Image: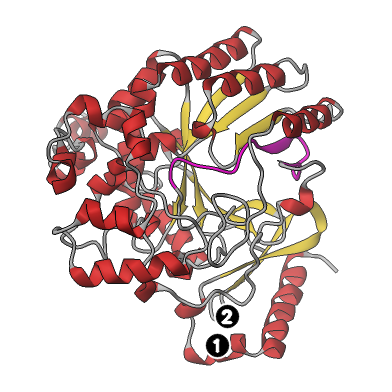
């Protein structure tokens, strides 16, 4: 017996530990009854999407009524002040509220995303603008962003089933707040006609992302209308319906049969035309995935709907290898394909949630190889000023000391440099002082641009 044969004949792969399989252990049972306000809510009621909508938390009074007696008093007072400082409207479904650890709400990863606290507010980054990605600058008609050569973003409406604190589109999504007067993009068929007309005249467009707002809030007839109109254009080959709905109100997929059937209809119509129609959703933490998620996504899978996920990297939510790996593997367990992880954009009022670009680079190294490559997301930066998405590690220059990363985006503008900035709070006291001085700030950016051009061979 040769050396290689002897080695393989005696090799036994160690059994996986129970911890290695914890991503398969979804929350089961009537867990929402742990909230005193919903102790008597039966399964049929909790799975009713209309009940979820009617009982969503939209004010401090509703939050108090739901968590009375289970949340620390200091937290309640902190949240009350936070409501008035938030650039986004607050809207949280009973489903999400029931998943929060109310013994430790300050550190809970779901609470961090949806319920603002005054005590956690940090000053906004000095380079922040309300529309940091410059989506409005690339709008040939209201509600359609055409930045990439063959793809456009169709903003069908400006409301969502919940409002995320970290929303990149806080310039438009939700109601006006104490801090922000919104640009409103209502679900208006007359506005949509302008979008359809523009798309029809641009044969280079092949890929349309339908978002908002959130397509979960569109009635079934509009899901059909938009899908059929787009599929009727010969040059449109791909449509993506973008919704956070399955992560925050999976009940709709189970009990709003009309909406689910409309989506399935467009998917099947696309397939008959040899076109690709998929659902893009948005889970950020493994705790958001329960037995209800499994059943809701399962029904889409049975109907042939392909589901991809886009995650936002957030401090205290998923900014560790363990938490990200758990999320990725749990998504795979319920049949959702991890697609992107976005480094958190510069968004007003949520500097406490942002991480550095280096954090994303480190986490990507840590999760790659933990599961199949096609189930491993790409970690990206959506660069400021309209450069679009770039692989986080594809920078031309990154100064960890000043927190300035510089990227090129040849398909958007081959001669322009685009920036990303790490959170000021993660920098040294000396560098924070330089950021506080406008002249020093501009010099740091100019120095970074010069080095990026030199390293990238640009003049």
Task: Residue at 38% x, 24% y: name it.
Answer: 253
Tell whether position 328 is magenta.
no
- Regarding residue 293, the answer to whether it shows in the image is yes
Residue at 75% over, 45% down: 147
Q: Position of residue 30 (x, y in %)?
A: 15, 34
Residue displayed at 60% across by 10% down? 269
Query: Which residue in the protein does label 1 denote?
Result: 431
Q: In the rendered view, does 147 fall on the left or right side of 10?
A: right
277 vs 24, nearest the viewer:
277
Examine the structure image and report whether residue 153 is included in the region drawn in magenta: yes
Q: Which residues are magenta?
A: 144-162
Which image quarter is the C terminus in? bottom right
Q: Residue furthest top?
A: 272
Give the numbered dot on residue 402. Answer: 2
Q: Which mark is residue 71?
A: none
Q: Quadrant of the N terminus?
A: top left
Q: Position of residue 6 (x, y in %)?
A: 18, 32
Q: Does 169 appear above or below 3?
A: below
Disc 1/disc 2 C-alpha distance (Å): 6 Å
Residue at 47%, 14% (x, y): give it: 261
Pointers 1 and 2 in contact (CB under 8 A)?
yes
Visible residue check, residue 372: no
């Amino acid at each position: 017996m040769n050396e290689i044969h002897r080695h393989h004949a005696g090799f036994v792969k160690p059994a996986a530990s129970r911890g290695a399989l914890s991503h398969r252990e979804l929350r089961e049972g009537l867990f929402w009854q742990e909230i005193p306000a919903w102790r008597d809510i039966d399964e049929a009621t909790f799975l009713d999407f209309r009940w979820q909508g009617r009982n969503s938390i939209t004010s401090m009074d509703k939050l108090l009524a739901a968590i009375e007696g289970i949340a620390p008093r200091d937290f309640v007072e902190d949240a009350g002040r936070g409501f008035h400082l938030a650039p986004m409207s607050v809207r949280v479904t009973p489903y999400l509220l029931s998943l929060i650890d109310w013994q430790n709400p300050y550190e809970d990863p779901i609470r961090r995303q949806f319920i603002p606290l005054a005590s956690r507010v940090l000053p906004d980054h000095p380079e922040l603008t309300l529309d940091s990605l410059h989506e409005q600058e690339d709008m040939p008609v209201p509600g359609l962003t055409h930045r990439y050569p063959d793809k456009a973003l169709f903003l069908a409406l400006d409301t969502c089933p919940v409002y995320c604190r970290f929303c990149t589109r806080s310039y438009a999504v939700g109601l006006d707040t104490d801090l922000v007067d919104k640009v409103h993009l209502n679900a208006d068929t007359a506005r949509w006609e302008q979008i359809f007309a523009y798309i029809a005249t641009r044969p280079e467009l092949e890929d349309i992302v339908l978002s908002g707002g959130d397509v979960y809030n569109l009635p079934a007839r509009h899901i059909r209308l938009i899908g059929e109109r787009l599929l009727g254009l010969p040059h449109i080959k791909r449509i993506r319906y973008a919704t956070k709905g399955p992560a925050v109100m999976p009940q709709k997929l189970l009990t709003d049969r009309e909406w689910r059937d409309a989506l399935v209809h467009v998917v099947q119509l696309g397939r008959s035309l040899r076109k690709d129609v998929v659902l893009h959703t948005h889970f950020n933490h493994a705790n958001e995935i329960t037995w209800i998620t499994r059943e809701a996504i399962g029904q889409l899978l049975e109907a042939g709907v392909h589901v991809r996920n886009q995650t936002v990297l957030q401090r205290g939510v998923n900014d560790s290898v363990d938490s990200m790996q758990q999320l990725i593997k749990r998504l795979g367990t319920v049949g959702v394909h991890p697609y992107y992880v976005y480094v958190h954009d510069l968004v007003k009022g949520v500097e406490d949630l942002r991480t550095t670009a280096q954090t994303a680079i480190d986490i990507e190294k840590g999760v790659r190889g933990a599961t199949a490559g096609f189930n491993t997301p790409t970690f990206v930066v959506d660069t400021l000023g309209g450069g679009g998405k770039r692989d986080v590690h594809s920078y031309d220059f990154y100064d960890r000391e000043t927190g300035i990363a510089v990227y090129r985006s040849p398909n958007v503008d081959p001669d322009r440099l685009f920036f990303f900035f790490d959170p000021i709070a993660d920098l040294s006291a000396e560098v924070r002082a330089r950021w506080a001085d406008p002249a020093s700030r501009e010099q740091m950016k100019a120095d970074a641009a010069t080095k990026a051009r030199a390293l990238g061979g640009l003049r």
